[in-house]
Amino acid sequence: MSETPSLKGAATGRRIGIGLMYGLWKPRVLGAWKVPAAGPVILAVNHSHNIDGPMVMGTAPRPLHFLIKKEAYVGPLGPFLEGIGQVKVDRSGTDRTAISRALGVLQNGGALGIFPEGSRGEGDFASLRAGLAYFAVRAGAPIVPVAVLGSTERRGRVVKGLPPLRSRVDIVFGDAFDAGDGSGRRTRTALDQATVRIQDRLTAHLADAKRLTGR
């Protein structure tokens, strides 16, 4: 198995995330206590802003190892992301190195962050990739849904894809749940069924989060 991403690096990334996110925006964190304090866990995050990853890294109660597309690893950002324990993934095919490293995080009792929609979009969990179900079932890790709800107003934006600086961003953590059916099966049918269960839970959490925050 390839080298497991550094937990110490992820802890450093969390401190950086706390400084940046609380310095530039006004995070309001709800339900962080729902994240299991120990053991493997997957945080499934909706993805509509460029700050979603750093925001969750800075507000989650545990250091996180996010699966991040290789296109983000440009220039000095590449070594930085490696240094803070993130997992580079090539989305053009089956990236066995990324899979191995992500499973290593979970097998070591760590916390893995995933954008199950694959890329930044509407952030409504409308299109899920099967990878989330695979990791959850293979590692026996519970999933915690996370909704990041920031301002979508264009007024006040400094950079496209970011909420206006100093605006409020709500981060709502949901109840942990198991994706599998209890059989441990990892057949294509079992993973497809798990993906449907996951999508239902994530979509319901997002709706609850919007009602809770008035977004």
Image (cartoon, rainbow, N blue to C red):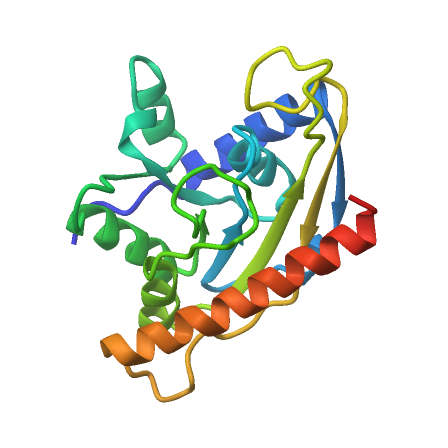
Q: Is residue 41 left or right of residue 148?
A: left
> Does residue 186 appear anywhere in the picture?
no
Q: Is residue 163 left or right of residue 166?
A: left
- Give the quarter of the image for residue 81: top left
* In the image, residue 20 above or below residue 93: above
Query: Which percent across, then down, holds residue 196?
Result: 44, 71
Q: Residue at x 68, y 19 (%)?
A: 154
Quarter of the image that includes the C terminus? top right
Q: Residue at x 72, y 13 (%)?
A: 156
* In the image, residue 179 above or below residue 37: below
> Does residue 209 appear anywhere in the picture?
yes
Query: Which percent across, then down, holds residue 65?
Result: 42, 44
Q: Residue at x 49, y 31 (%)?
A: 13
* In the image, residue 88 above or below residue 197: above
Query: Which percent across, then down, holds residue 51?
Result: 56, 29
- Asked whether 84 or 188 is in front, the reply is 188
Quarter of the image that includes the N terminus? bottom left
